[in-house]
Image (cartoon, helix red, strand yellow):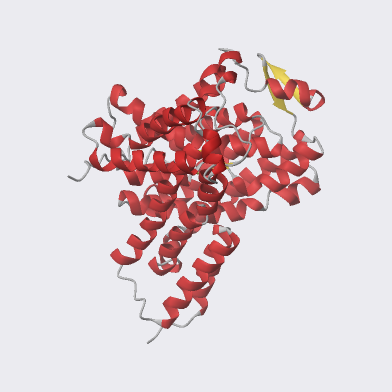
């Protein structure tokens, strides 16, 4: 029996919407807090700004794009240089603010000249493989970085999620991600505290000398937390305080701007790919309505506001697109509730600690399915558009996008290559 489709404008009762929103939070949590861990920013602030940014994005896209905005991985290297290594929080956030303004500049250009050219220059033979690599480019993260830390837990979580997705009844069928994570978490406790972990490590199914999960921080974490507290101690000379919150003082240096702001052009192209995926999944032309210009406006302002609080730049998240594809619940109302939950988690230390304790391998099992669903959506795009793959021209475009995207892991570069090839290679008369 196929799942009931919940459309973008549907406003579900809170009792039903909350668990649906919670699985979106679980899906985005790991990646959103990983970026600040790698760059020296505050994970709590990143969680806070992801929620604020998502609400801003939904306001400017009129709630017509069911996307969640989390920390962008594209900015990791320059942020780490200025924050973790040079302790220049102000310079990093100054560059991030200008990156937000780059979004606004492109928004104005599209607003003036229109977005019709996007469909004209980015046909299905480009969109399809771009969507595929959005999923495949994340495969290494899901498999090698996450699932491989404990294959027994990852496989159990994956199978549990598939079971609930296909055989679940009623509400259970539309919250398979949440149920899969809970199942994987419980199984992890059995593996670790039942004494099975050493045997799995001996068999090579789990990373050696690595604890599966640690629940002790849950008991020591405070109930109420200030997400910006880290900045008051580590960057006291570069922050100003207001109502117990601490905000970085932006510094607009040429070096930081040149290192950080231009990355926005790459993430804009990645955003385009994500919007194609969401449009494919929801069967809506989001480039036309609400328009890609509004997507850029929302993401640009979300990035600028994140920088104001000391958070990483924002971007639409593939993990949450995967949740849409699996559950067929496209409601933007559910995404907005997820944003409120994320903000709440950043302020409640114990709840944030619970999510932080989820084993990496559990999320690895989940992400194998989420990222795979995105790649499958790209194949569906080309099939439904009846792309002519008997054409050598089209095969070249698809081949270059796939290999360049998977080989570099850079969706933006592969997308740009596909667009250029589509413009340069002659069409058969």
Which of the 4 image quarters holds residue 416? bottom right
- In the image, 322 versus 87, the foreground residue is 322
Residue at screen point 59% across, 42% down: 207
Q: Is residue 237 left or right of residue 419?
A: right
Task: State the residue at coordinates (45%, 62%).
Answer: 118
Image location of residue 245, percent across then percent down:
66, 19
Quadrant of res 230: top right
Q: Quadrant of the C terminus?
A: bottom left
**Camera sees residue 100:** yes
| Figure check: 256 above or below 132 | above
In the image, 182 versus 31, the foreground residue is 182
Q: In the depicted view, which residue is nearer to us: 414 or 333?
A: 414
Quadrant containing the N terminus in the rendered view: top left
Which image quadrant is residue 220 in?
top right
Q: Residue at x 30, y 70 (%)?
A: 386
Residue at 50% across, 51% down: 271
Task: Please state the horizontal and vertical placement of residue 405, each as a whole percent of the image.
Answer: 54, 63
């Amino acid at each position: 029996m196929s799942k009931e489709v919940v459309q973008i404008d549907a406003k579900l009762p809170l009792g039903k919407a909350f668990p649906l929103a919670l699985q979106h939070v679980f899906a985005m949590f790991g990646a959103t807090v990983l970026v600040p861990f790698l760059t020296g920013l505050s994970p709590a602030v990143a969680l806070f700004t992801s929620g604020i940014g998502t609400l801003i994005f939904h306001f400017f896209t009129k709630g017509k794009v069911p996307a969640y905005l989390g920390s962008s991985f594209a900015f990791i290297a320059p942020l780490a240089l200025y924050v973790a290594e040079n302790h220049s929080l102000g310079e990093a956030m100054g560059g991030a603010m200008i990156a937000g303004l780059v979004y606004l500049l492109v928004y104005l250009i599209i607003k003036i000249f229109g977005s019709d050219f996007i469909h004209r220059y980015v046909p299905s033979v480009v969109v399809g493989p771009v969507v595929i690599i959005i999923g495949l480019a994340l495969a290494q993260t899901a498999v090698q970085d996450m699932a491989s830390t404990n294959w027994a837990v990852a496989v159990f979580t994956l199978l549990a999620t598939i079971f609930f997705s296909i055989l679940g009844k009623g509400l259970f069928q539309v919250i398979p991600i949440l149920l899969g994570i809970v199942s994987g978490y419980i199984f992890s406790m059995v593996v670790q505290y039942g004494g099975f972990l050493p045997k799995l490590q001996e068999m090579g199914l789990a990373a050696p000398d690595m604890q599966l999960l640690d629940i002790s921080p849950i008991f020591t974490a405070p109930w109420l937390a200030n997400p910006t507290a880290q900045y008051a101690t580590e960057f006291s000379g570069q922050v100003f305080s207001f109502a117990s919150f601490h905000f970085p003082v932006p510094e607009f240096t040429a070096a930081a701007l040149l290192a950080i702001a231009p990355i926005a052009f790459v993430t804009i192209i990645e955003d385009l790919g994500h919007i194609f995926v969401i449009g494919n999944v929801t069967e809506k032309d989001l480039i036309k309505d609400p328009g890609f210009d509004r997507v850029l406006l929302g993401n640009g302002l979300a990035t600028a506001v994140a920088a104001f609080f000391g958070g990483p730049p924002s971007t639409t998240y593939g993990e949450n697109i995967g949740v849409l594809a699996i559950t067929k619940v496209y409601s933007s109302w559910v995404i907005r509730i997820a944003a409120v939950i994320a903000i709440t988690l950043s302020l409640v230390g114990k709840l944030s600690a619970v999510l932080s304790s989820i084993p990496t391998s559990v999320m690895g099992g989940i992400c194998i399915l989420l990222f795979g669903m995105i790649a499958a959506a790209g194949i569906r795009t080309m099939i439904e558009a009846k792309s002519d793959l008997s054409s050598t021209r089209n095969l070249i475009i698809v081949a270059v996008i796939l290999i360049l995207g998977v080989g570099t892991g850079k969706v933006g570069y592969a997308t740009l290559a596909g667009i250029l090839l589509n413009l340069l290679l002659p069409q058969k008369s």
